[in-house]
Image (cartoon, rainbow, N blue to C red):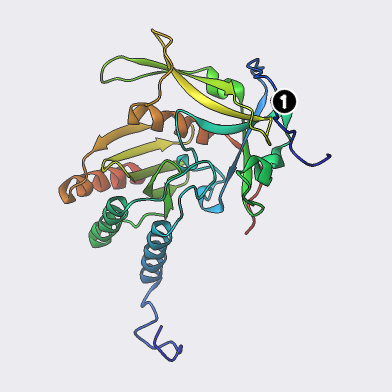
Amino acid sequence: MSESNVATDTDIPASATDLRVEVLRWKVECASRLQDDWDSYGAAPPNRDAVRWAQRALNLTLAEWELPSTVVPSADGGIALCWDAGSRHAYIEFDNDGTAIVAMYVSVESPSLSEFEPTDAAILLEIGNIQRFMRV
Amino acid sequence: VPGSPQQGGDCEQDNSFESSEALYRRFSREHIEMDGQLRAQNFSGLPGTSVNRGKYSDPDHVLHPDCADGKCFTLWGVCSFQVEDVAAQIYELEDDGRKFRFVLQHVPLPTCKAHSEIGCIDFHSGKQLDRLPKKIKNRFRIFLAQRVRVIIEPAA
């Protein structure tokens, strides 16, 4: 918002997609501001690395892929980009230990899981796998 | 006091869990999916994930400050699953064949008698584990997320 608190053309997202992107970015930002023990079950907020990778993954997704449905903090310390389509679910979770995991599953079936060290190339590969899984 | 959680005081551990006993855990609105299923990201701290056991508490007691480290969670929801959801499965890590079994332990707190924890043991040695392979942890929390029922909806 501009200083006068009046919306200008540049403040207003150009499309529904732009609005979704804005909301997802806010969610990353909000997760990064959580306090220690935010669920009183002892959860740590996502650390700087996890947040940075989540932002990076979001930016890489924007280029050519379907946006995640949401971004959520993990009660296990970290942050996850989540895709939902009917009974199909997938997430990439960037953990506070600097690693990441991808999970894909249908309804109550057993998930497919893969761990990886976050890099641009690895994230793109995993997002591609998620997109194919979600489209089946 | 009606409506308040039972105090733990110096009560003894009761590690007798019926398979049909309900377990309760609170969750925030962002951890529920469009189809009503809970997200795996709600489950933390494995092993050592906290729950309230139904034998000593009502569902809403997980929102009460006495069972939430003195904090207020009146806008959060409550989900439930059963003891058998935790204890019935053995998880094998494909990478090396290690097997894991999840177990419940009653860990009463001074202000929350119902407090319990989900622990994990090595299936072969019976040794209690304090760290889990990431794949096992995620498989288990997805399993729980797939089975929980929402008892109290979080506030909009």
Mark 1 residue crowding within 10 angstroms, few (<14) / some (14–19) / many (20+)? few
* Pointer 1 chain: B
Residue appearing at x 42%, y 42% in the figure: A89
Quarter placement of the C terminus of chain A: top left
Task: Where is residue B1? Give x, y as percent.
Answer: 83, 39
Quadrant of the rendered structure where residue A8 is? bottom left
Q: Could you tell me which secondary element the residue under label 1 belongs to?
A: helix
Residue appearing at x 41%, y 50% in the figure: A45
Which residue reaches farthest front? Answer: B10
Task: Where is residue A60? Give x, y as percent.
Answer: 23, 57
Vertical order, B51 against A67 (above or below): above
State how many labels appear: 1
Task: Where is residue A106? Give x, y as percent.
Answer: 43, 36
> In this orientation, which residue lies closer to the viewer: B51 or A57?
B51
User: Does residue A91 appear anywhere in the picture?
Assistant: yes
Residue appearing at x 54%, y 18% in the figure: B87
- Residue pointed to by mark 1: B55
